[in-house]
Amino acid sequence: MHRFLTFALLFILSIQPVLASGVNRAPTPNLKSSVEAYLNNAEAFGFSGSVLLVVDGKMLVHKGYGIADRTRGVPVKADDVFDIGSVTKQFTAAAIMKLEMQGKLKTEELISKYLDGVPADKAGITLHQTLTHTAGFVNYSGGDYDVAERDETIARILKAPLTHQPGAQMRYSNSAYSILAAIIEKVSGQGYETFLAEQFFKPAGMSSTGYVLPKFDKAKLPRAYEAGKDLGTALDHKWSPNGPYWNLFGNGGIFSTTGDLYKWYLALRGDKVLSAAVKTKLFTPALNNYAYGWDVSKTPMGLLITHNGASDNGFNADFGFFPEKNTVGIVLSNAGSFMDTRIHSSIILDTLGRMLAGETVIKPTKSKFAKLDAAALTKLSGKYRLENGDEFRVSTFDGRLAIEPSGQSAILALGQFPAEDPALSSANEKAKPVAGAIVKKDFSVFKENLADPASFDRLKGAVEQRIAEWEKTDGAYKSFSIEGTGMSWWSGAPQPATFVKIQFEKQSRLFRLHWKDGKIVNIGGAAVPAPITIPLQPTSPTEFVGWHLITTRPIDVQFSADGSKLTVTANGATSTATRVG
């Protein structure tokens, strides 16, 4: 199911946070070669997808990377077709603006003018609120591929309780955009995709964008992969003759290419599809910098307009541009998430943003790799302990080895974070009493350490719910430990995140405390297995090079011939650990 990640702020998955480090910097003179080198390295360490980057109106990159079909060994091509997930929403928003441009509706009007059976608690909701995720509609109306037709889906959304008073706050809602798609059909008198095709796709020259009208050939589509599993093509899911069913319709699931999306960007720059007046409304942000189907924010490099298309069926997409600089980046991927941390398209676009801001990306120490079979990799998997008791955990991940740390010295030994940063070690000490109280169902210490006391009820409820779910599936609580703190890249601008391991009867679980200026600003779930996980590529049967797509800091890992020891070299420092399991 496509899902925009909303647990933290909406800008987690845009290139905006990383640009703060680029104030007063300029892009490197050899930006094109640097970008190409980064993408080639990203491909070697797990990325696959299509990337388009235009800087100041000049095409720097438009190329496919990685594998579209791993069984047949088919490479990704630049104009392969991908499911773009929630990037679909900006087409829905543009369609509403087109109808306003045609004089058929106004965003200030109530949705009840266009929909039957709107209950009293939703009678005051406007199209503007629905577009900006401030209406209070539930996020999900059901599974993306559940059989659900338009009228029954809209009735179910309207029947569900509101998440908040309309207009009071912003909460991302996929269901809100299904509401908008229904309004588009009723006002235009056409099917949703037909309206988009006639008003936008054909005028912009976009021949490979839509649900079913382009007549996509499933045999030529990339297959999606998540944690080593082949999830098939985007057409392998249950669809109606008109495209996806209505839990997904209008809010996600449109197919497109990087080339077509660039044509759409060019159309938005001119007046071919929308007038200047309606585009002003389209890109004017409301709460949390969300406009109509786009995130719009001010950065050191100027105005930034973005949207992400996260998905848990392997496909993901990111689309961002600086209109004042005629600079646009589009990344479509079939590689799912990177080590359960971030989706590939966001990582790539984030890093391109950092490079545009002048940051130098570090290359791996070696670029020629050996081929080892699964048995050879499994033989090296296990736990390796440092003298102080901290550990490295080596395991297979998506056909390659990966190394992750347990304990602060192991975290720092991997060389991805500054050892001299006092915020890392101090966070560990601050986390102990907080975590110790939480596991006893006492949230007083947690509340005392919050940066924003107003967030207490929300965060407390999330922690309580998570622990209750774990106790139900994993048995009674036994103990807890602090796994260590690393700089988190999944919560916006880099901030320390402390990993707390809770041991239950059946297994252990992790949650994270995110810090800023010594106070807790958020919590994180159990999906991320360690403060950092680094994929490894073999250069011999016992020697490996590691490189992280986000930090781009390389490491060298060497196993002893008998597999009893592991040596990690990073930033000129070496650490040796002994195998214990």
Image: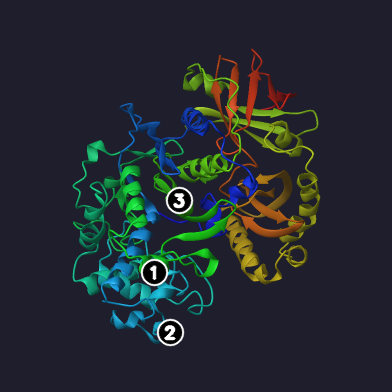
Work out which quarter of the rendered image holds the N terminus and state it: bottom left
Left or right, residue 569 beside residue 276? right
Three-letter amino acid code at disc 2? Asp
Q: Which residue corresponds to the image point at 74% horizontal and 66% vertical from the top-left?
A: 447
Q: Which mark is residue 306?
A: none
Among the two numbered marks 1 and 3 on one chain, the one whose residue lies closer to the N terminus: 1
CA gap between label 2 and label 1 equals 15 Å
Picture quarter containing residue 130?
A: bottom left
Please tell me in which quadrant of the rendered image residue 177 appears: bottom left
Mark 3 packing: few (<14 Cα in 10 Å), some, or many (20+)?
A: many
Q: Secondary structure at mark 1?
A: helix
Give the quadrant of the C terminus: top right
Q: Which residue is mark 2?
A: 121
How is the model colour-coded? Answer: rainbow
* Amino acid type of the residue that numbered disc 1 sits on in the rendered structure: Ala
Q: Position of residue 580 (x, y in %)?
A: 69, 27
Near mark 2 (Cα within 10 A), the count class, few <14, some 14-19 or many ≥20, is: few
Q: CA distance from mark 1 to mark 3?
A: 22 Å
Nearest to viewer (mark 2 / mark 1): 1
The residue that label 1 is drawn on is 176
**Percent coordinates x, y for residue 526 in the rendering:** 58, 50
The image shows residue 96, relative to residue 539, as above or below, that is below
Determine which residue is flagged by label 3: 320
Residue 94 drawn above or below residue 76: below
Q: Is residue 195 above or below residue 54?
A: below
Nearer to us: label 1 or label 3: 3
Left or right side of 131 for 559: right
Contact, mark 1 vs mark 3 (Cβ under 8 Å): no
Q: Earlier in the sequence, mark 2 or mark 1?
A: 2
Q: Residue at x 59, y 63 (%)?
A: 465
Nearer to the camera, 377 or 129: 129
Compared across the picture, whether 200 is left or right of 55 comes to left
